[in-house]
Amino acid sequence: MEQFLLDNAERYKNLVAKFRPVASGPKASDSTTATPEIVVCSRLRPMLEDELAQGFPVGVYLRGNTNTVDLHELKQPVRGLPRITSSDYTVDRAFGPDATTAEIYDSLIHPLVPWAWGGGVATMFAFGQTYSGKTYTVSFLERQVAETLMDGSLSGERNIYISIIELAGQTAYDLLNARRQISILEDSFGVTQMAGALEHQVTNKESLLDYIEAAASLRRTAPTMKNDSSSRSHAICRIRFENHALPSSKDGLLYMVDLAGSEAARDKAIHDVSRMKEAREINTSLSVLKDCIRGRALADADSFAGKSGKKPAYIPFRQSTLTKTLKHVFDPASGRSCKTVVVACVNPCLADIGASKNTLRYAEMLRVVMPKTKPAEYHPGVPATWNNEQLRSWIQTNSGDPAINPTPLAPTETGPQLLRLPMPEFLSRCLQTPDVSAEQAQAFQAKLWKLHVDSQRAANRASASASSSKASNNSGSGKPGSGGRLEMLDSSADPEPGSAEVPFQQRIRPGMVVGWKPSAAGGYESFSVGGKAYAMVMCPREVVGERVRDVRGEQVNGKDTTGSSVGGEGKGETGEAYLCAMVAPALLPGSYGISPWRQVVVRVEEMEAEVLMEWDEATRYYYMTV
């Protein structure tokens, strides 16, 4: 076959020079747009010296300044001269042989770093035929990531940890621990864990690059028909960012995945049985990966289009060790904010046109587009319809006191974009406003999300809302579902008009939630987190009976066996105090539970501020609000 290509190289070049793309009506890109969460790009590497020396022509071309790649195959018909068969493939971004890896990094990979730094999940996949420049591209991108992480351009401080594993077939190895075998398991919460893999903390660029180079030296390689040292395994480099300023938030994750080089079935004439079995395992895992990436892209497209009630696409992430390891990247139920970039590395040489065609076809199938629609009509109760100006106005008037500055929180984002912002990044931006506490920032984030969730539910119960609209006009009826004061009691906020103008210490009542700082004298320090705790007021301490004991088992009020007073003045404490129920973080992020049977005594002088809590019927938890 190669000799046939060499014999007809000049004719091939002439036919390609005469090729003109066929204009077949409006392009799909004119009426559709790609999902913003997953970007698929192709990179054509330059022709190598040995390929040029043998006389092979270029078989893959970038079409002008578009994102379309043209591929031309030389075919020998039964009769007549050889002719070309052309096909084209469209991706989100296409880079020609003159594009540098630095351009790819600045355009696509660099935005992933602050996304993961802010608490999101960012993933970069590189795939392609062996000898297509895939590992070269990933190595450069990893060095650029290390440079960005350590050049001081990212705001805030993070603890940075790195782990690198290798997946060969269904077996996983730790490349930073002498290639010891590890297990990929799901814990009781459904989270995939790399059991046995070591994680190393890094503080500078040199140590980060040392770990990456050490892992590369241990990676499994083997000779193939195209490459004497082809990567025969998937390498996953995971960098985790721990934000110690927000200990309750999930850590940011950055994955850089160098996939094994794909091989064609025709190579069985040269490869032995074990090598072909290995190739089948690689191609099978790549096929499952394609289904998972496309499934997540479809789920994101439905989310952007507002199809929340549509049955979600099936994502088979458990069918491969690779996709099982990256479960939270693909599973929409994980709740993580994810961005993914796929880099398809293409060998442009005509001798490898078949493998290049498979790579481009694979890349195009990963791309999911959705119809371009007009912006939704603005509705004050639907964040998904807000532009940047409307979003800023809402932030200014609904973020509490002091009002959160909308400029650092939403410099360019619209309502849907802000909803997709990772929670740690959202909170960090809120805290840039002076005098805004972490509690206020978290409460405001919960308020925005509650408004968004309620607006989605409203679409499904529009008929019920219309039938109850007449009853809601009679707010004084006091009947369930009639609105008015009864609905206000779903929140811990004081329902009396003008109560916000009175200092909270002067209007303490049962049901009020307060933030307090346990003192050493009270003995409750062990029940606080970071020196702060939350409690719901139940009643004044002096009205409590003698049989009541607090969470430590100590009597709250009354006389002990000797007749001496206990609690309050009996301990030398002064000032007014209340018996309260403990309020502690619950299972879901940002949620809280109230424990009426776990009681503490809180003095008014220890109370720092009133904390507004709101009950959510769907999750059965309480959330802070403003």
Image: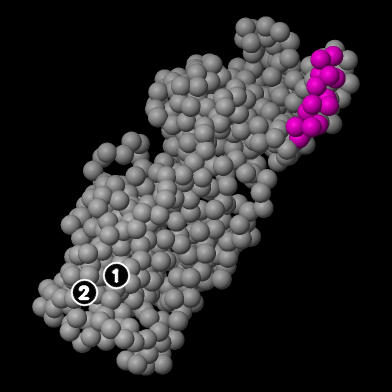
Relative image position of residue 580 (x, y in whole percent): 72, 27
**SS state under label 2:** helix
Of the 4 image quadrants, the one containing the C terminus is: top right
**Between residues 603 and 165, which one lies in front from this camera angle?**
165
In this orientation, does residue 396 appear? yes
Q: Quadrant of residue 229?
A: bottom left
Part of the protein shown in magenta: 461-474
What's the residue at 30%, 67% (across, down)?
71
**Above/below status of 172 relative to 276:** above
Magenta highlight: main SS: helix
* Label 1 sits on residue: 72
Of the 4 image quadrants, the one containing the N terminus is: bottom left
* Label 2 sits on residue: 12
**Residue 470 belongs to the span the image colors magenta:** yes
Q: Amino acid at mark 1?
A: His
| Distance between mark 2 and mark 1 Cα atoms | 9 Å
**Above/below status of 424 relative to 230:** above
Relative image position of residue 594 (x, y in whole percent): 72, 35
Q: Quadrant of residue 612?
A: top right
Q: Quadrant of residue 624?
A: top right
Sequence-earlier tag: 2 or 1: 2
